[in-house]
Amino acid sequence: MKTVARVIVAALLVAGIAACAKKTTTKPDDTQVPSTPTTTAPADTSGRYTRDSLETDSCLRQRVVYFDFDSSSINPQFQAQIACHAAYLSQFPDARVTLEGNTDERGSREYNLGLGERRGNAVQSALSAAGASSAQLNVVSYGEERPVDRGHDEAAWSKNRRVEIVYTAK
């Protein structure tokens, strides 16, 4: 079983590297993701993290996954980031994460709570597929209630369509 998990993690890392290497094109304004540094494979791909890696490893410090408008599909640019967190969680079975799903202000409160949960579940599934235990993962949806940008334009909305990876136990 561990061999299968390692193969999956390796495949996600390769996919993440390939996605980062592709030439990017500008998306229309209604689906643009905020500009974030693209992630690459962690420097130590053997999975030998320390507890301090959460603060020192550049890949593990990236804890926000952004989504396109009205979508719960994970953009390929975040696959390497998810693989890093899955490898850390796999190495430290006592570590726990809350995946906080968020949306922009458009849509009803009920719809946005559901969409935030679908986004959190998408990240949870990706982390589980990459080797994290489902017992380590908790999903919470805040819908539109916790915006990081209170603006009313696409630039603000794109920052609010996200899942935050919050370590509750390291």
Image (cartoon, rainbow, N blue to C red):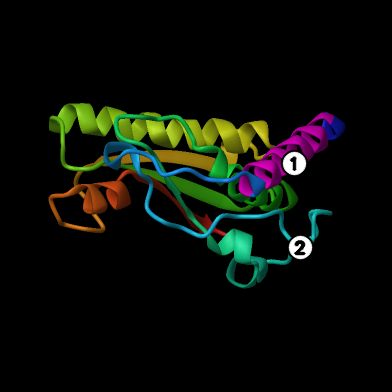
| Mark 1 surroundings: few (<14), some (14-19) or many (≥20) residues within 10 A | some
The secondary structure type at the circle numbered 2 is: loop
Picture residue at 71% right of the left edge, 54% below the top: 41
Picture residue at 49% right of the left edge, 56% below the top: 63
Residue 14 is left or right of residue 161, and the answer is right
Would residue 64 be seen by someone viewing this image from the given angle? yes
Residue 5 falls within the magenta-colored stretch = yes
Vertical relation: 42 (above or below) 120: below
Q: In the image, which disc is placed on residue 43?
A: 2
Q: In the image, which disc is placed on residue 165?
A: none
Residue 41 falls within the magenta-colored stretch = no
Please tell me which of labels 1 and 2 falls first in the chain: 1
* Rendered location of residue 18, percent (x, y): 69, 42
Residue 51 is left or right of residue 64, and the answer is right
Picture residue at 66% right of the left edge, 67% below the top: 53
Amino acid at circle 1: Val
Specify the principal SS of the magenta part: helix
Picture residue at 55% right of the left edge, 50% below the top: 96
The answer to which image quadrant residue 163 occupies is top left
* Rendered location of residue 45, percent (x, y): 80, 54
The answer to which image quadrant residue 2 occupies is top right
The secondary structure type at the circle numbered 1 is: helix
* Rendered location of residue 106, percent (x, y): 16, 36
- Contact flag, marks 1 and 2 (Cβ < 8 Å): no
* Rendered location of residue 160, percent (x, y): 28, 49
User: Closer to the camera, 124 or 39?
Assistant: 39
User: Closer to the camera, 133 or 78?
Assistant: 78
Can you say which quadrant of the picture contains the C terminus?
bottom right
Q: Bounds of the magenta span?
A: 4-20
Amino acid at circle 2: Ala
User: Closer to the camera, 146 or 133?
Assistant: 146
Q: In the image, which disc is placed on residue 14?
A: 1
